[in-house]
Image (cartoon, rainbow, N blue to C red):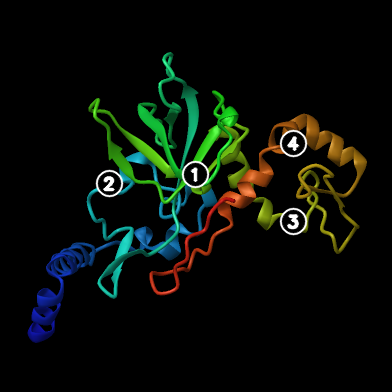
Amino acid sequence: MFCQLQNIAQRNQEAFILLIQWIILNMANAGMSKHETKSEIAKTSRLRNTLHFPVFSKLPWDNTPSFEYYALKNCILTPNRHWCFIGEVHAKPLLLLRQSVWVRDLEGNDNIHVAFYPETGTFDYSDLKVGNTLCVRYAERHHFLDFTAGLRLEQLDFVMVIPTSLKTLLEISDFSPEANNTYCWICGISKSEKKLLKCGKCNVAKYCSKDCQISDWKRRHNEWCQAIPGYKKLVDIDSDVTENNFDYKAFR
């Protein structure tokens, strides 16, 4: 084993250091309780799954290797899972020298500066409205020159805005449309008992009658309808992926 480590060190000193960090990190995590494992967290509401939707304070830094999010594969750091940061836009700067916003995350942290430095991809900046939810796949924390910490966004195909609040998005997640696609969203009758109708706009919500559809529209679906397509994109990830079969998944 020692000879193997020596060979790695000779080929790539940085990779050797990363390997040692990985060993230390895994030794530190050896005592993790079963309630903190991937299988346990995955049972919760999709957007409350902190493995795939971490709050800002848990994101990796863009200039520091994190073996919570990455693993060594052929001496190259490769993501070991998909993750996405979500935050509600609550303010925009008065002087718009660069496209940027301030967002609030699931933890209630509203001091998160998000700035755009586009290098690849496309994005409609008109979607950056106060009250909408910004979603950033593979987000990493960044230290700006003004001493603030936030997100520096360069690959825009990994950025999406959902036209609803974070609160409404969590309500959709807690309801779990994917788990209720064979039942009426109001009375709960199964499609095996009665033919279900589908919402013509979001193409997801199911109802056994026009009365149930109208009732749900008044109750919540008037807010949920335009947000559900974005929610579907957000949770459309392979939760079992590892560094061995990882492939980046863009929103566009």
Q: Residue at x 32, y 61 (%)?
A: 70
- Nearest to N terminus: mark 3 or mark 4: 3
What amino acid type is highlighted by mark number 3?
Answer: Asn
The reply, left or right, for residue 8 in relation to residue 230 is left
What amino acid type is highlighted by mark number 1?
Answer: Leu
Q: Nearer the viewer, mark 1 or mark 4?
A: 1
Q: Which mark is residue 181?
A: 3
Residue neighbourhood size for the residue with mark 3, other residues' Cα within 10 Å, grouped as few (<14), some (14–19), many (≥20): some
Q: Residue at x 54, y 29 (%)?
A: 128
Q: Nearer the viewer, mark 4 or mark 2?
A: 2
**Residue bearing the label numbered 4:** 221
Q: Residue 65's image quarter? A: bottom left
Residue neighbourhood size for the residue with mark 4, other residues' Cα within 10 Å, grouped as few (<14), some (14–19), many (≥20): many
* Camera-nearest residue between 158 and 199: 158
Determine the CA span between mark 4 and mark 2.
Answer: 38 Å
- Nearest to N terminus: mark 2 or mark 1: 2
* Camera-nearest residue between 220 and 10: 10
Determine the CA span between mark 1 and mark 4.
Answer: 29 Å
Q: Element under label 2?
A: loop
- Nearest to N terminus: mark 1 or mark 4: 1
Determine the CA span between mark 3 and mark 2.
Answer: 38 Å
- Nearest to N terminus: mark 3 or mark 2: 2
Q: Which mark is residue 156?
A: 1
